Image: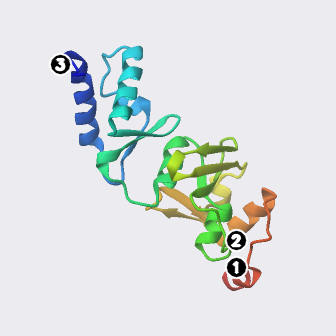
Amino acid sequence: MALSHASAQPLSRLYHGLEALSTPDRYLFTPADMRALLPSLRDEAYRALLSRAARGGRLERVCRGLYLYRPARPADGRLLFHAAARLRAHEFNYISLETALSDCGIISQVPQSWVTIMSSGRSNVIDCGRWGSIEFVHTRQKAANIAGQLVYDSLCGLWRASAAQALRDMRAARRNLDLIDWSVVHELV
């Protein structure tokens, strides 16, 4: 079934716009991001266009409200972190809990394809399909109060907790401490 020129034109405009905007570090787009590329399209037609683009394989739905532009060829292994940063762009977020402790060797067994993020937003687990899951854990802490315990991870696009802060977060969130290697903690903290 061939697409008519009129129906292919918006899809072509979408792809050209995404090609111009995307990079290996900027490959995740919200429907609102992409909507700006086709402002004159009616809402119903726009939703149908996104569905058609996803079926065509150049756009892939990561989770509700977030799409991967596949030709951008994102860097492997960081999609969940980048997705977390995009999904909670207006919240205070930082990598912590099991993910931060695993990265510094304090916890050796962490589920693959699962990242833990402290967030000023509500607690929630976001299923990102074949990439894994993002667990947001609510915190009332203010950035100014723990700034000395955070470093910016430019590869992930998020702040990252120190080992000491991640341990405090584990206790505050009442997480299981059984997997912690306390001999490593005493060396690092």
Q: Which residue is mark 2?
A: 164
Q: Are marks 1 and 2 in contact (CB under 8 Å)?
A: yes
Q: Quadrant of the N terminus?
A: top left
Disc 3 or disc 2, which is closer to the eye?
A: 3
The span from disc 1 to disc 2 (Cα, nearest Å) is 6 Å
Q: Is residue 145 visible?
A: yes
Image position of 106 with respect to 38: above or below:
below
Taking the spot 68% from the left edge, 58% from the top edge, the residue there is 145
Q: Reading the chain from its start, which is encountered first: label 1 or label 2?
A: 2
Horizontal relation, residue 135 to residue 132: left or right? right
Task: Determine crowd level at label 2: few under 14, some 14-19, many 20+ residues with C-alpha closer than 10 A.
Answer: some
Crowding at mark 1 (Cα within 10 Å: few <14, some 14-19, many 20+):
few
Amino acid at circle 2: Ala
Residue nearer the viewer, 159 or 66: 66
Q: Residue furthest left?
A: 5
What is the C-alpha distance between the residues marked 3 and 2? 59 Å
Q: Residue furthest front?
A: 1
User: Residue beneath label 1, please?
Assistant: 189
Residue type at mark 3 is His
Q: Along the horizontal axis of the image, is 38 left or right of 175?
A: left
* Residue drawn at point x = 60 percent, y = 50 percent: 134
Q: Nearer the viewer, residue 134 or 150?
A: 134
Q: CA distance from mark 1 to mark 3?
A: 63 Å
From the image, which quarter does the C terminus lie in? Answer: bottom right
Q: Secondary structure at mark 3?
A: helix
Q: Which residue is mark 3?
A: 5
Residue 51 versus residue 29 in the image, above or below? above
Q: Residue 128 at x, y = what percent? A: 54, 45
Please tell me which of labels 3 and 2 falls first in the chain.
Answer: 3
Between label 1 and label 3, give the one nearer the viewer.
3
> Residue 175 versus residue 109: which sits nearer the camera?
109
